[in-house]
Amino acid sequence: ANDNSIKKWIFDKTDGTPRLLHFAEGHSKPVSIVRYYDSLDRSFIISAGLDVSLRTHKVNLNSSLGFSKREKKIPKYLQPHFESFVLFTPIRSFATCTVRERDWDNLITCHENDDRAFMWRVSAFGCYRGEITFTPMPGHAVTAVALSVCGNFAILGVQLGLIYKFNVQSGIFRNSYPKDGAQHRHNKEIVGIEIDAINRWVVSADSSGLIQWWDFRSHDFHKSLNIPSSITRILLHRDSGLLAIATQDLVIRLCDTESQKIVRKFRGHQSPITDMTFSPDSRWLISAGSDGSVRTWDIPTSTCIDWFKTLSPVTSLCFAGQGDVLVTSHAGRKGLYSWVNNSYYSNLMLGPLPDAAKAIELPGLKEKSDDLNPNDTESLVNNNMDYDFDHTSALADKLVTLSLDPNLTKWKTLVHLELIKERNKPKEPPKKPVSAPFVLPTLPGLEPTFIKPTEEQIPIPSSKFLNFGIVKPKTVFIELLTQSALTRDYSDLLKHIYTMSPSALDFELRTLNTVDDYKEFKALFTFIKTNLESNHHFDMIQSILNVFLKVQSDIIVQNKDLLNLAKEIEVLQREVWRKLESLFDFDMCLIGHLANLNT
């Protein structure tokens, strides 16, 4: 129904009227906040909606475990709390702590235009109301909340700029920031409060752009930082100590809480920033704008490495699990949407970003936007963005470019093909069939191709001795190799090599013909030499050269011309490896230097 619920009824009464057997429901109004809750024995997404309720969701099961999930039996002492969970106004912000989840309430919420803050208990059945309610300043709304790392204290910021500290277990007022309540206090509305990982600093921010650091225990003022724009929200990554600051000038600033200095600035949003989240390793910062854009910022390089756009603006987002799933909520949508992090499941090559992101239509929605072309809608899972980036050429002359084959083990298989065949050799020899059928000869390769010899290719021998080089048909590999040696254009040959299996390529290298003054040998040497000089397809060329020298070394040492070509390739090999060895030595020295600094 429109209330986002599914109900199951049973007709087992004598009068024929039904009774409710089971029911499950989600938010009846759009979701406004999503956060990840991770403890030792449970982890899920906690969402707050405009229907003034909190709900928990298992990401891997795609199901709601909130108030409406009745399949599990709820203990009797919890049932009164589940029946009276409705609050007065929508939730504005909430904070959680997993340390004391078995001892007392571990979730605190503040609400729109409400001077109270409510404590909640997060359990395996969902979230239910606690018994403690904080009212720091009657008549003035609570605008920001935070829980200490130990789970013993709650920090509340009010609309007038005051900050209060309460005990979570007893609900007793402890102190304020600052203690005297006048000096160094905020004069504008508090928009965010964060506490570091060791309960050393309390960081507060107001709407005027002022950020202040307070000593958690002594409640004394420590330092302040002025941002040249109004602050809309802040977010702290406790493990790294990085504080993300979103402002009205559409710039995201990163501040180091230890040095209290700005270390990064991210520009690119064209609309107000609605929410932010850090990746678990604090390498990425994901931000969402009111225009539906979601940007991924790489913190070490201070660049935007990916972005996409949805037809419905993102109101909140958070990483779930180990960073493999991104969960978002959208304006006017009652459900949560999960996005897979492709870097966890495939090797991604980062390239230049497009000037305009293509819109992504949310599942089950058929809405259109005026400023986006619906024909450009593309699935994010495919991640097939058309980048104007040339993968065939190196970024610099001194760099070595690897092959573009997605099968990374193909060239290793080619080098160790004999060992692989030996290991895969059956224990018992195959039995000879009673009558072997006639099979047409085919060319080696992934796709079977029949050999069509012509009379010109197989001339009538003038001698009784059979020349196997003349009888052997010319394969596609040999034809492309000889043609490319004349034109020095190896594009067609490279495309054909990518389609060949390791066994087919090994066969071609073993059956090179020695007729016409070792024409095929010289053509292969030229192919290898050209690619070594251009620093292209390095891994593929090394594998081909390895197998070629191993299986044809007896023939090469007997011919002077082939031996000279091999010596030229040796010189090129030494030059290429000298470059790589210098880079390896530099990296090892740098790692050793950094290791000594840490010790």
Image: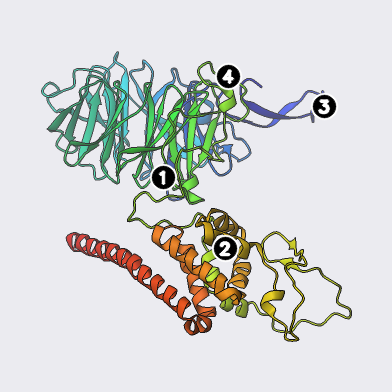
- Other-residue count near label 4 (Cα within 10 Å), few / some / many at <14 / 14–19 / ≥20: few
The residue located at (27%, 40%) in the rendering is 242
Q: Quadrant of residue 35?
A: top left
Secondary structure at numbered mark 1:
loop
Numbered badge on residue 368: 4
Looking at marks 2 and 1 on the same chain, the residue that comes earlier in the sequence is marked by 1
In this picture, residue 315 sits left or right of residue 596: right
CA separation, marks 4 and 1? 47 Å
Instruction: Assess whether mark 3 and mark 1 are in contact (beta carbons under 8 angstroms).
Output: no
Residue 71 lies left or right of residue 235; in this view the side is right
Classify mark 2: residues with Cα within 10 Å, few (<14), some (14-19) or many (20+). many
Tell me which label, 2 or 3, sits earlier in the chain: 3
The amino acid marked with disc number 2 is Leu
Q: Position of residue 549 (x, y in %)?
A: 49, 77
Cα–Cα gap, marks 2 and 3: 87 Å
Numbered tag placed on residue 481 in the rendering: 2
Residue at image point 57% right, 32% down: 378
User: Looking at the image, do the residues carrying marks 2 and 3 touch, with CB atoms under 8 Å apart?
Assistant: no
Residue 214, image quadrant: top left
Extreme residue in the front direction: 462
**Label 3, on which residue?**
14
Rendered image coloring scheme: rainbow
| In-front residue for pair 477/68 | 477
Check disc 1 and report the residue beneath it.
102
Q: Nearer the viewer, residue 350 or 210?
A: 350
Q: Quadrant of the C terminus?
A: bottom left
SS assignment at label 3: loop
Residue located at (46% from left, 59% from top)? 537
